[in-house]
Amino acid sequence: MKSIILKISLQSVLLLICVFFLAAQNPNFVNGVGTWKDNIGNPINAHGGGILYHEGTYYWYGEIKKGQTWLLPGQGWECYRVPAGGVSCYSSKDLINWKNEGVVLAATTGNNSSDLDTSKVIERPKVIYNAQTKKFVMWMHVDTKDYAFARAGVAVCDKPNGTFTYIGSFRPNGQMSRDQTIFMDDNGKAYQISSMEDNATMYVNELTSDFLKPTGRFKRNLVGLGREAPAIVKHNKRYYLISSASTGWAPNMAEYAVSDSIMGVFKMVGNPCIGRDADKTFNSQSTYILPLVGKNNSYIAMFDCWNKSNLEDSKYVWLPLKFVESKMVIEWKNEWKNE
């Protein structure tokens, strides 16, 4: 009898070990709570980020928010800041287990004339690969702490996880540029989508063949609507653009717009979010839409859950993005598995 009990106990232990092993191998995305950690147990620090897929690996680039959060007075809005920390990079094969590749664009210290000084703002970095020049090109929003500079910065590198060389900054097509993203179309052309005209209008700026500057061809969209935090995806030959209202660090309702052409007119459709706190974008803000490689019509919508009084402690929200009869749907899930 004892041997039977012992045998059952051993089987139970082995079963539990298998369950825990499988859970470790295939963990869920857990949204908005807890701290996402890298492969050595440190918090992932990659806010306002985007992801590049290159040769079988996903590279996640984001803002390094580290240090004490402080409030810049006299701005008319809650202008919370941390010292600019540069841009981090993490790599993964499965989007769950992330290796810290280090700081790929470092901030400078004590050089107020530099765009990358810790006294400045470095936000929303996005990286795309140029097959013609064989360069990885990073675009970002660079600014002074009061947001008056309002420029786009560009950096390049020969490797996705190497040290990027900063080229400089400018106002694309002569307009203020703040929240932004980069998009490459199926034909290899690239575009910067940015909140411009003092955040009043969203521009789609066509880029030169080396992806380093605008061609001068652009399209004004969502004119006068005050949209920011753009994230774009192409689905069934149509372009879907998510953005947020301009309410500082406070969450608001996301809306998406649709166009049949990247340089066409984007028409507002409505809120793609459903479920808990959908009217506040799940207490977060859009940053990027990731098409999943090898999975047709499968996407992840990436959001930042900002903690305005402690920006280093801001969390991440990643959710499956689906299309139901051409309508974009992002449903809240406390946790989910990418299968």
Image (cartoon, rainbow, N blue to C red):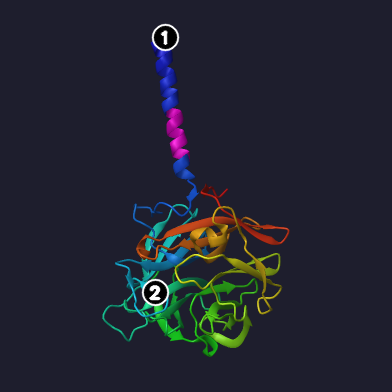
Amino acid type of disc 1? Met
Residue closest to the eye, 329 or 236:
329
List the residue tagged with mark 2: 79
Regarding residue 288, the answer to whether it shows in the image is yes
Residue 95 forms part of the magenta stretch: no
Tell me: 214 left or right of 148: right
List the residue tagged with mark 1: 1
| Front position among marks 2 and 1 | 2
Q: Is residue 211 above or below residue 37?
A: below
Tell me: 93 left or right of 311: right
Q: Which mark is residue 83?
A: none
Residue 141 picture location, percent across and down: 45, 77
Q: Secondary structure at mark 1?
A: loop
Q: Secondary structure at mark 2?
A: loop
Q: Which quadrant would residue 5 be assigned to in this image?
A: top left
Regarding residue 130, the answer to whether it shows in the image is no
Amino acid type of disc 2? Cys
Residue bounds of the magenta highlight: 14-22
Q: Which quadrant would residue 44 be assigned to in this image?
A: bottom left
Residue at image point 49% right, 55% down: 95
Residue 136 picture location, percent across and down: 48, 73
Q: Is residue 171 above or below residue 4?
A: below
Residue at image point 46% right, 29% down: 15
Residue 314 picture location, percent across and down: 40, 61
Residue 18 forms part of the magenta stretch: yes
Residue 337 picture location, percent across and down: 54, 47
User: Quick one: quadrant of the N terminus?
Assistant: top left
Q: Main secondary structure of the magenta part?
A: helix
Q: Is residue 38 above or below residue 4?
A: below
